[in-house]
Amino acid sequence: MKINNRLKKIGDLVAPNSICLDVGCDHALLDIYLVKKKQNIKAVASDVKEGPLDAARENIKREKLEEKIEVRLGNGLDTYKNEDTVIISGMGGRNIIGICKNGLSKLKNVETLILSPNNYQVDVKKFITKNGFYIDNEVFIKEGKFIYQIIVLKKGKRRYKESELFFGPIFLQNKDDKLFKEYYKRELSSKEIILKLLPKNFWFKKILLKRDIRMIKKVLI
Ligand SMILES: C[S@@+](CC[C@H](N)C(=O)[O-])C[C@H]1O[C@@H](n2cnc3c(N)ncnc32)[C@H](O)[C@@H]1O
C-alpha cells in the first residue's frame, strides 16, 4: 500500500512496542504502515466520519490486519481508551488544539503525543506545552512543494522562551538545516506580503507581524 513521505516519517517516529491511537486516521494508511513496519505495534484507527472509516476498514481487511488494527468511530479523544501514544496529523492547528482541549483528562494517561498540524504550529506548541507535555523532537518533512512540521511530545513540564516556542526548541538548535532555512524564508516572505496588504486599522496585527518578521530575520542571518 502506497504511503507518502510525511506519514512514513510520522510512523518512523513511533517507538516500537507502542499502543497507538491515530485520531483522524482517514484511510488508516499510517496504521497499516505502523503495524507492518514497526516492531510490536498495536494501532487504533479512529475518525469522526463514517466515510473515511469505511475506507480504513476496507484497507485493513485487504491487508489482513484486523487482528492488529482496531477501528473506532468518534470525535477526537472520545475514542481514547488506554493507549500510550496518540497521533493527530494532517489537520488544522486549531482543530488539533480543540481536540486536545476537549480531551485533556484523557491526555493525562498518554506518554507520547505526535502532532503534525497543517498550520498554527506555534499556537499548538504553546497550548500543549502549557498542558502537561514537553517537546522531545521536531522534524521538517518536504512533500511536493509543502514543508510539514512533525512535533513529538512527551509527558512532562519544561519552560520555554518565546523564541523557542516560535521556532521550536529543537528546530532552533538546527537552524543551519536546509529545510529550516527554506521554511522560514517562506514564512518571512508571506508575512511581509500580509503586512503590506493589511489596512491601517489592523494596527495590532501589524505589530505582531513586525515582531515575527524581526525574529525570523535575526535567526536567518
Ligand atoms: C486530511 S485527513 C488527515 C489524515 C491523516 N491523519 C494524515 O495525516 O494524512 C483529516 C482526517 O481527520 C478527520 N477528523 C477531523 N476532525 C476530527 C475530529 N475532531 N476527530 C476525529 N477525526 C477528525 C477527518 O474526518 C479526516 O478523515
Image (spheres, helix red, strand yellow):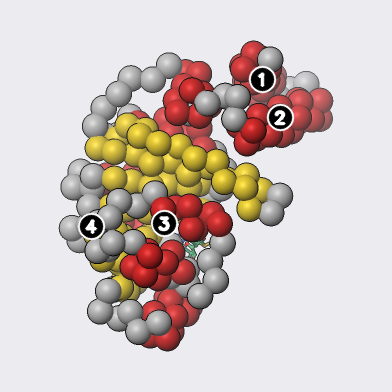
In primary-sequence order, the first of circles 3 and 1 is: 3
Q: Are marks 2 and 1 in contact (CB under 8 Å)?
A: yes
Which disc number belongs to residue 17? 4
What is the CA distance from the residue labelled 3 to the residue labelled 1? Answer: 30 Å
Q: Which amino acid is tagged 1?
A: Leu
Residue at image location 29% in from the left, 45% down from the top: 112
In primary-sequence order, the first of circles 2 and 3 is: 3
Q: Which amino acid is tagged 2?
A: Lys
Q: Which amino acid is tagged 4?
A: Asn
In primary-sequence order, the first of circles 2 and 4 is: 4
In primary-sequence order, the first of circles 3 and 4 is: 3
Which residue corresponds to mark 2?
A: 185
Q: Which amino acid is tagged 3?
A: Gly
Secondary structure at badge 2 equals helix
Viewer can see residue 193: yes
Query: Would residue 170 appear left or right of 214 to someone viewing this image?
Result: left
What is the CA distance from the residue labelled 1 to the residue labelled 4? Answer: 39 Å
Mark 3 near ligand 1 (CB under 8 Å)? no
Tell me residue 113's x, y (percent): 33, 46
Query: Would residue 22 appear left or right of 67 to someone viewing this image?
Result: right
What is the CA distance from the residue labelled 2 to the residue labelled 1? Answer: 8 Å
Q: Do the residues labelled 1 and 4 touch (CB within 8 Å)?
A: no
Residue at image location 29% in from the left, 38% down from the top: 154
Which residue corresponds to mark 1?
A: 220
- 176 or 31, nearer to the observer: 176
